[in-house]
Image (tube, rainbow, N blue to C red):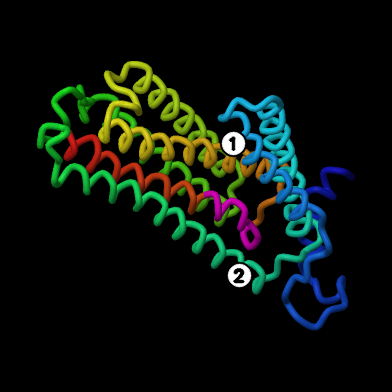
């Protein structure tokens, strides 16, 4: 009975959302929630505690840790509520999903602008190197990576993970649960392998983030990309669990669709990093 409910309850609820909620429009009027306020205070505690910790104030580290834990908890319970609204309450109608898609697109555009700043700094410094670094790029004191070793291998791995993610997406659209699970498993394995190789590269680097403009640009760009890979891995892991417990159908799988878009964005950013920073920039 429990398995039948998990598998078919969202079908029954989503077939006639207007009958369940007695509303005459397809939009979702969100119920009052404490999580925006809790999240705001958590972010305040995190940033305030971070500043106090960096200035060696007593209790700064504790406040920063508390804010971080509260923020993680807020993220969990807020997204838990959204999953419940989408899967079991049938609130995410076609019109709501359209709005969510626009929101994710705008979020990815803002992320593109975020990385655009790092690429701007890199080209600004590399196209016209100043006398302080010897008027050459990369600076003579920097021992750069060989682009055709670990960076190229990571490129192949990340592009393969993007292909596996697309395979999983098409499997969901075709109603093949086994292929979707296999594609997601492959995506996550490749993502973990990429992160491990990136960490190995950092451990054996001949320069640090404090080694002038090259180190700053390199570690800021590749480091934030690595952080986005970690976030995307967490995103896809949640999608794997939701797929396992039958949350996704052919018509209602926006959670996975958003994760796939985000993962493809991570792929494209890495392509630009490989071509500009690792290959051309070296």
Give the numbered dot on residue 99.
2
| Predominant SS of the magenta segment | helix
* Image position of 168 (left or right of 266): right
> Residue 142 at x, y = what percent?
20, 24
Residue marked by disc 1: 51
Highlighted range, magenta: 250-259
Can the viewer see residue 6? yes
> Residue 158 at x, y = what percent?
38, 37
Q: Is residue 256 magenta?
A: yes
User: Label 1: few (<14), some or many (≥20) within 10 Å?
Assistant: some
* Residue drawn where x is 71% and y is 47% of the image: 246
* Image position of 121 (left or right of 203): left
Can the viewer see residue 79? no
Q: Is residue 221 magenta?
A: no
Q: Nearer the viewer, residue 71 or 278?
A: 71
* Residue drawn where x is 34% and y is 31% of the image: 154
User: Label 2: few (<14), some or many (≥20) within 10 Å?
Assistant: few
The residue at the far top in this view is 204
Q: Nearer the viewer, residue 236 or 172?
A: 236
* Image position of 200 (left or right of 185): left
Q: CA distance from mark 2 to mark 1?
A: 37 Å
């Amino acid at each position: 009975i429990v398995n039948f409910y998990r598998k078919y309850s969202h079908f029954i609820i989503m077939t006639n959302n207007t009958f369940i909620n007695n509303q005459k429009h397809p939009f979702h009027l969100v119920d009052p929630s404490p999580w925006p306020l809790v999240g705001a205070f958590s972010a305040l505690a995190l940033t305030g505690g971070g500043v106090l910790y960096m200035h060696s104030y007593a209790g700064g580290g504790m406040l920063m840790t508390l804010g971080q834990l509260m923020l993680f908890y807020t993220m969990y319970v807020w997204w838990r509520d959204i999953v419940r609204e989408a899967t079991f309450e049938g609130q995410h109608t076609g019109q709501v999903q359209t709005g969510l898609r626009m929101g994710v697109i705008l979020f990815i555009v803002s992320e593109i602008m975020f990385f655009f700043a790092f690429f701007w700094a890199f080209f600004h410094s590399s196209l016209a190197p100043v006398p302080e670094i010897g008027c050459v790029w990369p600076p003579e004191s920097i021992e750069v990576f060989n682009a055709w070793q670990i960076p190229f291998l990571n490129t192949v791995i990340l592009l393969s993970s993007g292909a596996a993610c697309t395979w999983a997406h098409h499997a969901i659209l075709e109603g093949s649960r086994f292929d979707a699970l296999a594609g997601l498993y492959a995506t996550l394995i490749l993502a973990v392998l990429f992160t491990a190789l990136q960490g190995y590269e950092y451990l054996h680097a001949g320069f640090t983030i404090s080694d002038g403009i090259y180190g700053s640009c390199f570690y800021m760009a590749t480091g934030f990309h690595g952080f986005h890979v970690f976030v995307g891995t967490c995103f896809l892991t949640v999608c794997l669990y939701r797929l396992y417990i039958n949350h996704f159908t052919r018509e209602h799988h926006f959670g996975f669709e958003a994760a796939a878009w985000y993962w493809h964005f991570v792929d494209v950013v890495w392509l630009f990093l490989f071509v500009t920073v690792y290959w051309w920039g070296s």
